[in-house]
Image: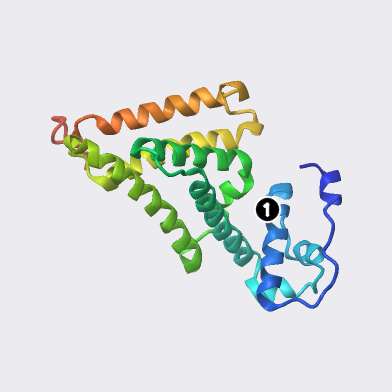
Amino acid sequence: MSTTELADIEPTKKVSWHHGNLREEMLQRGLTLLEVRGASDLSLREVARLAGVSQTAPTHHFGDKEGLLAALATEGFHALMTDRMSALKDGMTKERRLRVIMRVYVEFALKRPELFHLMFGPRIADKRKYPELMEASAGSFQFLSNTISEFMADHSESGRPPRFSAIAVWSGMHGLATLLADRESGLCQVPDEMIDDVCTGVTNLLLGGLKLPHVEAETPATRGGSRKK
């Protein structure tokens, strides 16, 4: 979004806010600013101005800028979950459900790249300081893990631990999502017209791999080597 578009964001008229409504308004304004400016240039002052409240209001609700960013990241996980649930339909097979939530993950990164980077990147130094963020993040992973466990129930012959399967799928989709979210940097090698094919191809590789027999990880001992001391 350009500077002109930022200027077009209308500040909220000053009203008497209910406590919860004010926090929600500031979060929505913060999410808009995040996609315009990025996390580094987002300011509490600008959020307050757009929400039509005093400059001290964001501090009262979020503490400091990192507190606001943590709240925005939490909202991001909630939004991702909402997108997933909206995309799932009754009657879908287990595999189709898994494919859908994997694709939604990538689409979320494409649609809201700055929020995606905030949710998973290093901008919030220690996410453990924010219990609501940790809970939302864990819930997102657990949803993926549960969906994979349902899928793997039909492929128990692979002998692969469920948590391993969840981490493997997440790693693959997260890597692709991160590449695509960074495509404006010029480093992404996936042109827009190939996004659908690449997403489908990566999904096929990941799900195909889950169906293969589990192979124990190699160690220096099993490779016949030795650890350096």
Query: How many numbered marks does the figure carry?
Result: 1
Secondary structure, mark 1, is loop
**Closer to the camera, 78 or 219?**
78
Looking at the image, is 129 positioned above or below residue 100?
A: below
Q: Residue at x 44, y 53 (%)?
A: 140
The coloring applied to the image is: rainbow
Q: Quadrant of residue 56?
A: bottom right
Asked whether, in this view, residue 216 is left or right of residue 101, the answer is left
Residue lying at the far front of the rendered structure: 91
**Closer to the camera, 100 or 8?**
100
**Closer to the camera, 105 or 54?**
105
**Closer to the camera, 165 or 84?**
84
Answer few, some or many: residues within 10 Å of disc 1's Cα (few below 14, many 20 plus, some between 14 and 19): few
Q: Residue at x 50, y 52 (%)?
A: 81
- Quadrant in which the C terminus appears: top left
Instruction: Find residue 29 and report its horizontal and vertical position in percent.
Output: 73, 59
Instruction: Find residue 80 and report its horizontal and vertical position in percent.
Output: 53, 50
Asked whether, in this view, residue 28 is left or right of residue 131, the answer is right
Asked whether, in this view, residue 53 is left or right of residue 138, the answer is right
Question: Would residue 59 be visible to someone looking at this image?
Answer: yes
Looking at the image, is 211 positioned above or below residue 28?
A: above
Q: Residue at x 54, y 60 (%)?
A: 74
Amino acid type assigned to the residue bearing label 1 in the image: Ser
- Quadrant in which the N terminus appears: top right
For mark 1, what is the residue?
A: 40
Question: Would residue 219 be visible to someone looking at this image?
Answer: no
Instruction: Find residue 192 and report its horizontal and vertical position in percent.
Output: 62, 25
Instruction: Find residue 167 and report its horizontal and vertical position in percent.
Output: 34, 44
